[in-house]
Image (tube, grey):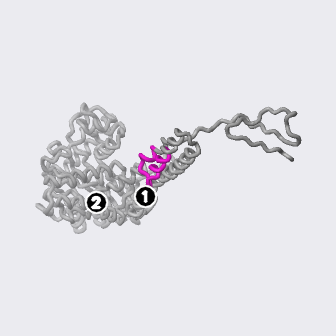
């Protein structure tokens, strides 16, 4: 097509609505419409933002210079020069904005790589292996384990509520904290072992969560740092031991070992101790008998935390009972229970996590049932296993008194309300504890076979709910322990980790 070409200056109005009589022959008239001039943009605000923000190579500052030049040239009427300056300001702003976004992302990426590198990644949650933590502490100037802040930091970044920590790391952390307050190395190791075992079995109330108690008492001089338990009275089957106010696990290991020795010789060993302290989970000591194919039993009294049936004053401790009996092929019966409806540590964990507690765990200062953990911890108390009198709470009350007979009364230690208040370090605890070992070889043959049959009989009965099989004492703990082995670590609540950091800061990094 032979089209005519139309040209016009920028100040002219193009041809519009031309009549056919005026069209050049063989041409096409193009309706251009009125021209609207696009206003010049000097990008001054954008340049100011990039200049105020930390930028790379002063790109934002260059953009600001050209924005100002564009505005000046526009004022002077030189639109061509103003447009050139505007274009340069635009591209400098694009570069500056890109760098301003990229640099923080690079720093975050490098920080993430550092954490992963230090963590010796193991498993889907474990960023904090032993080697990784050592590197972390070396990097930031500490030669011993001081806290678990690396765990808190990364868990906060990942918005997790739980952290996976290696057993070795937790054990070493506890040991180093106890060494820092002057505990004998072997005693610190004994404590670390029992606390980690508590967590492995799922009894978090008596594991790492409890470490601050031992640190506080040892640091205050209430718990002895040196020495060993001493036998004061003894027969072929019995013994009375003076715990010398040492750490509970030191006394517990000594007494259980003595009870097992006597049971090997005469069929039974019954050892009681006084002047002892909190010793972790009772099941840790009764389970020691399983290694020698014996029955183990363990009891201890504690600070008054339980309100007796029909009362409103705490006169008994949680007074746990633990019994372990061997079966075939490594199977066993493992009972470990408080004679209160629940251990105090579980109420403390609920309070720390901001959760209410189930009805039947505790009561308020008036002896009335309460689901508020703070009411139970402040003026109230726990209730015996069974709850109220109408639901059999008096039976738990009776079991608590039985433990007091075996421990406080038999050993001559403090008992009932004469034991110091929980967590108070104004005087020694002087707890009483009882350790019993029974050798089945001194009784009817076939003990392990019958024990296995008893366990299988209950595990294999038809459950009321198909998804909830019947268990025997020890099964939940075995399952939790197996999970820890599969994860190659122990899952802790982030609140517990934060609490341990607070303990470390209070006792080791802040000068009293």
Q: Quadrant of residue 151?
A: bottom left
Classify mark 2: residues with Cα within 10 Å, few (<14), some (14-19) or many (20+).
Answer: many
Above or below residue 326? Residue 398 is: above
Instruction: Identify the disc placed on residue 214.
Output: none
Q: Which residue corresponds to the image point at 56% horizontal and 42% vertical from the top-left?
A: 78
Q: Residue reaching furthest left? A: 232
Q: Position of residue 34 (x, y in %)?
A: 70, 34
- Local crowd size for mark 1, using a 10 Å CA cut-off: few (<14), some (14–19), many (≥20): some
Q: Which residue is mark 2?
A: 173
Residue 330 in view: yes
Give the percent coordinates (x, y) of residue 72.
Answer: 50, 41
Pointer 1: what residue?
112
Q: Secondary structure at mark 1?
A: helix
Q: Is residue 62 magenta?
A: yes
Q: Nearer the viewer, residue 236 or 278?
A: 278
Query: Is 170 or 311 nearer to us in this picture?
Result: 170
Residue shown at the point (68%, 36%) measured from the top left: 35
Horizontally, residue 260 falls left or right of residue 14, namely left
- Label 1 vs label 2: CA separation? 24 Å
Q: Is residue 190 above or below residue 335?
A: below
Position of residue 94 measured from the top left corner of the image (x, y, whole percent): 52, 50
Question: Bounds of the magenta span?
Answer: 48-67
Q: Secondary structure at mark 2?
A: helix
> Which of the two marks, 1 or 2, is nearer to us in this view?
1
Q: Main secondary structure of the magenta part?
A: helix
Task: Estimate the x, y position of residue 225 in percent, counting from the top left.
Answer: 15, 60
At 59% from the left and 38% from the top, the residue drawn is 39
27 or 310, nearer to the observer: 27
Instruction: Name the N-terminal-most of marks 1 and 2.
Output: 1
**Residue 352 forms part of the magenta stretch:** no
Instruction: Kindly identify the residue that appears in the image at 86 percent across and 47 percent down.
Output: 2
């Amino acid at each position: 097509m032979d089209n005519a070409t139309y040209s016009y200056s920028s100040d002219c109005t193009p041809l519009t609505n031309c009549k056919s009589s005026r069209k050049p022959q063989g041409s096409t008239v193009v309706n251009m419409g009125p021209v609207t001039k696009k206003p010049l943009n000097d990008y001054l605000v954008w340049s100011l933002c990039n200049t105020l923000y930390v930028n790379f190579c002063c790109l934002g500052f260059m953009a600001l210079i050209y924005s100002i030049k564009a505005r000046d040239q526009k004022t002077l009427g030189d639109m061509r020069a103003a447009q050139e300056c505007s274009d340069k300001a635009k591209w400098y702003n694009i570069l500056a904005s890109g760098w301003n976004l990229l640099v923080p992302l690079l720093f975050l990426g490098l920080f993430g790589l550092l954490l992963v590198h230090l963590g010796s990644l193991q498993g889907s949650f474990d960023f904090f292996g032993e080697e990784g933590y050592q590197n972390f502490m070396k990097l930031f100037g500490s030669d011993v384990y001081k806290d678990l802040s690396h765990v808190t930091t990364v868990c906060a970044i990942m918005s997790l509520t739980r952290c996976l920590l290696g057993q070795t790391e937790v054990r070493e952390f506890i040991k180093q904290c106890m060494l820092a307050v002057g505990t004998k190395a072997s005693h610190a190791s004994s404590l670390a072992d029992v606390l980690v075992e508590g967590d492995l079995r799922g009894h978090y109330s008596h594991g790492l969560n409890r470490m601050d108690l031992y640190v506080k008492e040892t640091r205050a001089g209430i718990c002895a740092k040196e020495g060993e338990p001493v036998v004061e009275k003894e027969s072929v089957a019995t013994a009375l031991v003076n715990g010398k106010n040492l750490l509970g696990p030191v006394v517990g290991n000594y007494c259980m070992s003595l009870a097992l020795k006597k049971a090997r010789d005469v069929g039974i060993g019954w050892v009681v101790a006084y002047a002892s302290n909190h010793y972790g989970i009772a099941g840790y000591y009764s389970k020691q008998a399983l290694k020698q194919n014996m029955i183990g039993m363990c009891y201890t009294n504690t600070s008054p935390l339980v309100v007796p049936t029909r009362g409103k004053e705490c006169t008994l401790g949680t007074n746990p009972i633990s019994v372990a009996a061997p079966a075939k092929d490594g199977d066993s019966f493992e009972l470990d229970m408080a004679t209160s409806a629940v251990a105090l540590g579980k109420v403390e964990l609920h309070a720390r996590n901001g959760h209410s507690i189930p009805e039947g765990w505790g009561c308020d200062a008036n002896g009335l049932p309460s689901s508020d953990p703070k009411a139970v911890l402040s003026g109230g108390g726990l209730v015996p296993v069974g709850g109220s009198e109408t639901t059999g709470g008096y039976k738990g009350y009776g079991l608590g008194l039985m433990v007091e007979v075996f421990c406080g009364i038999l050993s001559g230690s403090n008992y009932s309300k004469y034991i110091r208040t929980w967590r108070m370090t104004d005087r020694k605890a002087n707890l009483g504890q009882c350790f019993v070992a029974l050798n089945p070889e001194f009784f009817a043959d076939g003990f392990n076979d019958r024990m296995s049959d008893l366990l299988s009989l209950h595990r294999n009965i038809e459950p009321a709910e198909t998804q909830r099989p019947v268990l025997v004492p020890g099964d939940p703990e075995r399952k939790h322990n197996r999970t820890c082995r599969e994860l190659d670590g122990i899952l802790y609540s982030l609140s517990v980790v934060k609490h341990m950091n607070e303990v470390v800061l209070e006792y080791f990094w802040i000068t009293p």
